[in-house]
Image (tube, rainbow, N blue to C red):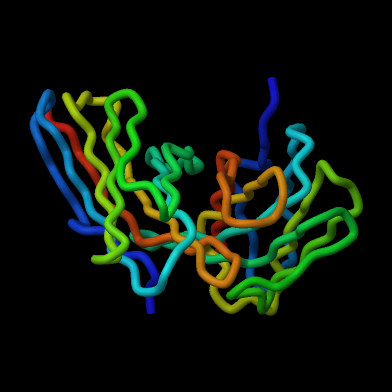
Amino acid sequence: DGGITQSPKYLFRKEGQNVTLSCEQNLNHDAMYWYRQDPGQGLRLIYYSQIVNDFQKGDIAEGYSVSREKKESFPLTVTSAQKNPTAFYLCASSTDYGTGEQFFGPGTRLTVL
Amino acid sequence: SQQGEEDPQALSIQEGENATMNCSYKTSINNLQWYRQNSGRGLVHLILIRSNEREKHSGRLRVTLDTSKKSSSLLITASRAADTASYFCATDVDDKIIFGKGTRLHILP
């Protein structure tokens, strides 16, 4: 089965700690994205990658970092510099970068204690 | 400011009724997409309509696009309990997709 997976589903972190969220896809997609969703809100773009070894900041990149060393993987690190990290994080991928259909993972809910 | 805004913010209807939600946007687009999100889950792509199309169908879904009014509507016919979800429109701005805040649809038994 092709798809996009995120782990873990729930994550708890103490203030001041960095944490890395996993995103893996086996759809052979070039483009991958990270979004943040807050209650009752739409999705806001954190980072995106058009191709392996390349990534770009989205609208709310401060306090986050990413890497794209493999086509299948696009991990997101939430650093201690992120002032309000508690949120629902969604990873997505698409065939290539653009404005076409995106495929989403199930999400990771991060709670900072 | 939001590129795409859904209306209403929330909608409750009886099972079997039709549900209509709307999306208005500000700038010209190449395409508009609708996604569904069940509570606590990822988004699922429903339909994409291009700027030169006026209407598209997919099963019980009907999407219209009026570029002169900068608006789109999503109609779900013969609603079912499983249609309870949030529905988002997504429009392309500067080669990126921008999501609205969504319409929360609740189907009453």
Residue A42 left/right relative to A86: left
Quadrant in which the N terminus of chain A appears: top right
Q: Residue at (42%, 55%) from the top-left corner?
A: B51
Q: Position of residue B94 (x, y in %)?
A: 57, 72
Residue A53 left/right relative to B38: right
Towards the viewer: A23 or A10: A23
Q: Residue at (10%, 29%) from the top-left corner?
A: B17
Compared with residue A104, is residue A40 higher up or lower down, i.e. above or below?
below
Compared with residue B82, is residue B34 higher up or lower down, i.e. above or below?
below
Compared with residue B105, is residue A79 higher up or lower down, i.e. above or below?
below
Q: Position of residue A5 (x, y in %)?
A: 67, 36
Examine the image and state in which quarter residue B89 appears: bottom left
Q: Residue at (28%, 46%) from the top-left corner?
A: B64
Quadrant in which the C terminus of chain A appears: bottom right
Examine the image and state in which quarter residue B15 appears: top left
Q: Position of residue A62 (x, y in %)?
A: 66, 79
